[in-house]
Image: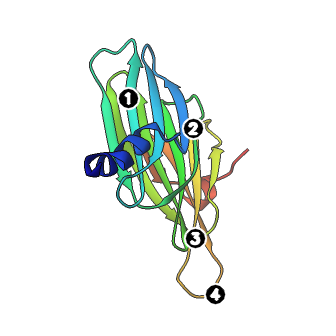
Amino acid sequence: MRYLLIASPAVLASIAPPIASLRVHGERSTFSVVVEDSAAVGYDIRIECVAACDHPVDFHERIDDVPMGLFTRDQDELLFSLWGGGSTYRVRVWKVGDSGIRKVVELSSRGRPDFLTDDKGRSAIRTYEGGSGTGPLKPVLRSFIRGHFVVVPAKAAELR
């Protein structure tokens, strides 16, 4: 009986429904993205290639923040996620494609971030930065350029 009590939490964790899930399509491959409660503290995000895989892909990352959103814009093979951590929002973005998985950026924002398209049609993220005081938050726009999210100067930050 003691063995069953010890094994029971592991069995229950393996059949618990995911917090969030999504299918992501590469050029040829299809990926499963799942966010689950971690057996320890926090959450796990797992990205696996499930169809037309050139090579096995099983990416896993433990995240201490609370999941709030998971989505793709079907552009540039980007997977966006929004998390809550203390007094900030956290944005994590991965590039998920036939060649593999790469974390593109991890950003913090004091205000709810915006997911946009810039004036050139590129994916963009606007975060809000500021100190811990009560002063106004400063918007910072980053556009996806050559595989990275880079800060766009204020004059070039016109969005549609």
Mark 4 residue crowding within 10 angstroms, few (<14) / some (14–19) / many (20+) = few
- Three-letter residue code for mark 4: Thr
Mark 1 residue crowding within 10 angstroms, few (<14) / some (14–19) / many (20+) = many
Residue linked to disc 2: 122
In the figure, residue 128 lies in which quadrant? bottom right
Q: Is residue 45 left or right of residue 142?
A: left
State the CA–CA distance, disc 3 to disc 4: 11 Å
Residue, x 30% and y 27% (percent of image)? 57
Mark 3 residue crowding within 10 angstroms, few (<14) / some (14–19) / many (20+) = some
Residue linked to disc 3: 110
Residue situated in front as seen by the camera: 53 or 26? 53
Q: Are marks 2 and 4 in contact (CB under 8 Å)?
A: no
Residue 47 location in percent, x, y?
40, 34
Disc number lying in front (2 or 1): 1
Residue situated in front as seen by the camera: 11 or 21? 11
- Three-letter residue code for mark 2: Arg
Residue, x 61% and y 38% (percent of image)? 120
State the CA–CA distance, disc 2 to disc 1: 26 Å
Disc number lying in front (3 or 1): 1
Q: Are marks 2 and 3 in contact (CB under 8 Å)?
A: no
Disc number lying in front (4 or 1): 1
Residue linked to disc 4: 134
